[in-house]
Image (cartoon, coloured by chain):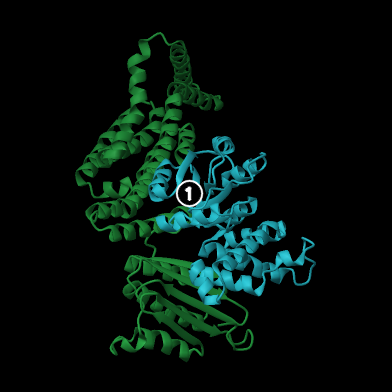
Chain colours: A cyan, B green
């Protein structure tokens, strides 16, 4: 991780050169560009070589998508510090969920404003999770659905807590979905920003560890609507 | 394919050819409303010429039968009809049909011109055809003097037909093939034209507007966003652009429509997040109408470019939050003649038996919270604050 105040080193993976140029312009001086790639193989190789703080990752990539990049990099030794932030135009639940479950620390849409993107990159570089309102909505929806469907059967993970959100976590996610920033959210709930971050990270962990089968089913159903 | 059938029919005698020509008259080319016949009916000069030819031919037939060459008769009537038909077709064909006719005739003419070239199979066909033709005619003519064997004229006729097939068969085949491929090409061209129209009506128009408004970023963004949405709906959801409003069946669809409408009308981004979904009923339509009013208010008065809408459908209630980070307002200071919030939002929700809470602080934005208990699905208290 970079020291306090030092701009994070960012690696950009997107198959559209135009979009990469746009993101670079928006990030500007706030980050150091560690490199860029337009397809899975080159991305994995360069990321393993340069070890950036944050990889801004397009969900849709030729040759396996953003998920393939996360999984391939994670399988290499010495890449634990590299964090992934997923970027997508599609908002299709199964895309988002799959890249988060592969290990991305957050998800934002490509229409995000420059300052918000920088803030998200800094947050991910610091080891926190970044939930866009949409992702928060997905997660709430998924866990509501799962709570409903697991009513009469035993949770598949063996750990019932992983398939359920706590009341506080639901509250936090609802406020994120309503468009609150972490700071506003902390004020609203009278808790510290750090506590908000830990709640979000806990949700992210649940999302990554809970029953794969049910989440996948939920995501598929949602995308068929 | 119809024409191929007729070409086969043509083998069964001259009448087949006549039928083919008549069919050509009455079967319109795909995409054409009028058949050639319809146009021919209004072509007086053409009809006159066609009709004038009839007495001439009748005389010819009479003379030929008087001379004892009765076999001429069997071909003549079909020839008369065919000639008249072809005349009418030629006179009344539309330009694309004339091109088609030229193409159809071209292989035949070129064949006649190049019959001297050392094409083996062509020579062979010519020789074979001539042999068959001679044989056939001999048999037919001989039939007149000896009337004993009744199978003979039939055999003669078959030989003549075989000769015709050998002469013209490849040409007919090619004719049929050309017709089929011509039709396919036409269908493809129509599809392309349709696509071009759609792209023109949507994408090109928008690009033109964007160029004109290049100095007004907000309008450019608004146009690009609306176009993106329309293009996506067309490419991925199969919705025809500009097909207009359909009745929404679910809460999710109705919410999405509100997002689209407010974004297009006010040039702000509306970020909607929905948890759960359910079929629409009149109360939910009321809730959505109030939510839309709140969203429009935020778009108009907050001064920001982003309005967040969050909706949650639960067992016992449906909630809708509309939030902006704009300038905020003090409700008591809103002029009395602006009824949006009081009437369209609070009044409407109150009549539906729900609650509406407005939180706003100057400089920090506004959040409108609407909650509607769902009667019949559970007891009627809002699930949370």
- In this view, B371 is above or below B36: below
Q: Can I make out residue A113 in this image? A: no
Q: Report whether B327 appears left or right of A161.
A: left
Q: Quadrant of residue A48?
A: top right
Front-lying residue, B146 or A127: A127
Residue A41, x across and y down, in percent: 57, 35
Front-lying residue, B154 or A72: A72
Residue bearing the label numbered 1: A6
Q: Residue furthest front?
A: A4
Number of numbered markers: 1
- In this view, B1 is above or below B159: below
- The 10 Å Cα crowd at callout 1, few under 14, some 14 to 19, many 20 or more, is few
- In this view, B317 is above or below A84: below
Q: Report whether B315 appears left or right of A13.
A: right
Front-lying residue, A186 or B105: A186
Q: Residue furthest left?
A: B45
Residue B310, x across and y down, in percent: 50, 72
Quadrant of the snapshot with the C terminus of chain A: bottom right
Residue A82, x across and y down, in percent: 59, 46
Query: Disc 1 is attached to a residue of which chain?
Result: A
- In this view, A82 is above or below B68: below
Q: Can I make out residue B311 in this image? A: yes
Residue at horizontal 47 percent and vertical 85 percent from the top: B356
Callout 1 secondary element: loop
Front-lying residue, A99 or B14: A99
């Amino acid at each position: 991780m970079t020291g306090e105040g030092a701009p994070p080193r960012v690696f950009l993976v997107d198959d559209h050169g135009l979009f990469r140029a746009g993101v670079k312009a928006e990030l500007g001086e706030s980050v150091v560009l560690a490199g860029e790639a337009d397809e899975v193989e080159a991305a994995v190789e360069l990321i393993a070589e340069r070890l950036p703080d944050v990889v801004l990752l397009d969900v849709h990539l030729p040759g396996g998508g953003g998920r393939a990049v996360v999984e391939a990099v994670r399988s290499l030794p010495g890449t634990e510090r590299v964090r992934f932030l997923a970027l997508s135009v599609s908002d299709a639940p199964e895309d988002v969920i799959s890249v988060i479950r592969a290990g991305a620390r957050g998800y934002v849409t490509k229409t995000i404003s420059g300052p918000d993107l920088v803030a998200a990159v800094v947050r991910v570089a610091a080891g926190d999770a970044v939930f866009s309102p949409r992702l928060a909505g997905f997660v709430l929806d998924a866990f509501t659905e799962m709570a409903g469907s697991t009513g009469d059967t035993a949770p598949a993970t063996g750990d019932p807590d992983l398939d359920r959100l706590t009341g506080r976590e639901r509250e936090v996610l609802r406020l994120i979905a309503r468009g609150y920033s972490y700071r506003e959210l902390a004020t609203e709930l009278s808790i510290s920003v750090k506590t908000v971050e830990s709640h979000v990270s806990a949700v992210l962990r649940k999302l990554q560890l809970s029953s794969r089968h049910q989440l996948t089913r939920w995501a598929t159903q949602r995308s068929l609507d | 394919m119809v024409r191929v059938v007729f070409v086969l029919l043509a083998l069964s005698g001259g009448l087949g050819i006549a039928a083919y020509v008549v069919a050509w008259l009455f079967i319109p080319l795909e995409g054409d409303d009028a058949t050639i016949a319809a146009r021919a009916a209004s072509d007086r000069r053409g009809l006159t010429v066609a009709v004038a030819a009839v007495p001439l031919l009748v005389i010819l037939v009479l003379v030929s039968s008087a001379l004892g060459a009765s076999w001429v008769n069997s071909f003549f009537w079909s020839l008369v009809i065919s000639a008249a038909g072809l005349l009418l077709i030629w006179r009344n064909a539309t330009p694309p049909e004339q091109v088609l006719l030229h193409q159809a005739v071209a292989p035949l003419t070129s064949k006649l011109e190049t019959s001297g070239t050392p094409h083996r199979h062509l020579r062979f066909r010519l020789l074979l055809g001539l042999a068959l033709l001679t044989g056939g005619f001999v048999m037919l003519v001989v039939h007149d003097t000896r009337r004993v064997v009744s199978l003979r004229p039939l055999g003669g006729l078959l030989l003549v037909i075989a000769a015709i097939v050998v002469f013209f068969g490849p040409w007919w085949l090619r004719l049929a093939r050309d017709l089929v491929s011509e039709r396919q090409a036409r269908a493809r061209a129509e599809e392309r034209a349709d696509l071009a129209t759609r792209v023109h009506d949507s994408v090109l128009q928008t690009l033109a507007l964007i160029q004109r408004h290049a100095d007004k970023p907000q309008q450019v963004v608004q146009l690009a966003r609306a176009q993106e949405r329309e293009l996506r709906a067309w490419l991925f959801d199969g919705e025809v652009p500009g097909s207009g409003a359909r009745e929404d069946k679910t809460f999710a669809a109705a919410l999405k429509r509100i997002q689209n409408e407010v974004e297009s009308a006010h040039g702000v981004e509306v970020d909607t997040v929905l948890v759960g979904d359910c079929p629409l009923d009149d109360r939910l339509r009321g809730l959505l109408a109030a939510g839309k009013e709140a969203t429009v208010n935020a778009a108009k008065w907050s001064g920001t470019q982003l309005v967040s809408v969050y909706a949650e459908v639960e067992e016992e209630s449906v909630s809708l939050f509309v939030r902006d980070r704009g300038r905020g307002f003090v409700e008591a200071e809103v002029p009395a003649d602006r009824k949006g919030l009081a009437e369209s939002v609070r009044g409407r929700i109150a009549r539906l038996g729900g609650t509406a809470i407005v939180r706003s602080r100057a400089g920090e934005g506004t959040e409108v919270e609407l909650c509607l208990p769902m009667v019949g699905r559970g007891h009627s208290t809002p699930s949370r604050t």
